């Protein structure tokens, strides 16, 4: 009798464990993955011939100030892991791309303030050249190989011109998006008043992608703030 009771208990225990195993097996791929950060973000900064010294300064100061704003810090805190990873790249023509900020994790106000001040004061270290958005995208996508594991991977590319050297932008965009990377754009309309349309057609792609236009470099600070806020918060937020 005791043996029979023990057999029933073991059978029930096995059935329970089997059911639990089936629950875990049926979870969607990646749902239980323990990501290190909510977002890995590449900031790709235009340093081509069309960007003069003053325009470069306005870009970097605007970008830096965005990380100092409380709204951006609050958006980081609202994430599941409450931290993001950021790197920054200067780019111009085909063979001109340079990382000016290696991957760093922003977790808390002090980190955001430090990164904001570093970006705002970053000097221009890249030689001017043609506008190769396509090569900038390829270079930026490769940086994710060394990024912290992230739930979302985004390239934030800003520029004031169209691709005029290097491979076709749309083909490169499709290649990058196929890797699970979202590309968002900030189009500066000081030279091409329809550049946002070009960005929509040839540059951006991936889940929740978008373009934010800036009328000119004076408008860049507010535009990059809105862009960062939207990227950190995630798709579906306007």
Image (spheres, rainbow, N blue to C red):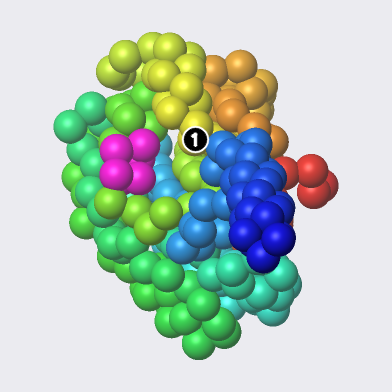
On screen, 128 above or below 61? above
Q: Is residue 91 left or right of residue 209?
A: left
On screen, 163 above or below 187? above
Q: Is residue 121 left or right of residue 198?
A: left
Point out residue 206 in the picture as x, y percentages from the top left corner.
59, 29
Instruction: State which quadrant residue 201 falls in.
Output: top right
* Rendered residue at 51%/77% (across/down): 107
Closest to the observer, 183 or 96: 183
Membership of 82 in magenta stretch:
no
Task: Please name the residue that numbered disc 1 is placed on.
Answer: 181
* Rendered residue at 41%/46% (across/down): 44
Q: Is residue 135 left or right of residue 79?
A: left
The stretch in magenta equals 140-145
Membership of 141 in magenta stretch:
yes
* Rendered residue at 82%/47% (across/down): 238
Point out residue 54 in the picture as x, y percentages from the top left corner.
42, 58
């Amino acid at each position: 009798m005791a043996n029979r009771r023990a057999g029933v208990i073991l059978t029930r225990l096995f059935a329970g464990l089997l059911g639990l195993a089936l629950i875990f097996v049926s979870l969607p791929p990646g749902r239980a993955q323990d990501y290190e950060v909510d977002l890995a973000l590449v900031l790709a900064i235009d340093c081509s011939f069309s960007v003069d010294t003053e325009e470069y300064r306005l870009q970097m100061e605007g970008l830096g100030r965005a990380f100092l704003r409380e709204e951006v810090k609050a958006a980081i805190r609202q994430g599941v892991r409450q931290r993001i990873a950021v790197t920054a790249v200067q780019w111009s023509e085909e063979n001109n791309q340079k990382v000016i900020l290696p991957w760093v994790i922003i977790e808390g106000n002090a980190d955001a303030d430090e990164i904001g001040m570093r970006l705002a004061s970053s000097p221009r270290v890249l030689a001017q050249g043609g506008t190769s958005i396509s090569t900038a995208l390829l270079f930026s996508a490769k940086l994710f190989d060394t990024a912290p594991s992230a739930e979302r991977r985004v390239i934030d590319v800003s520029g004031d011109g169209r691709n005029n050297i290097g491979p076709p932008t749309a083909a490169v965009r499709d290649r990058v998006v196929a890797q699970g990377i979202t590309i968002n754009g900030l189009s500066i309309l000081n030279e091409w008043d329809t550049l946002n349309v070009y960005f929509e057609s040839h540059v951006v792609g991936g889940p929740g992608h978008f373009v934010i236009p800036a009328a000119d470099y004076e408008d860049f600070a507010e535009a990059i703030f809105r862009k960062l806020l939207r990227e950190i918060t995630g798709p579906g937020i306007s």
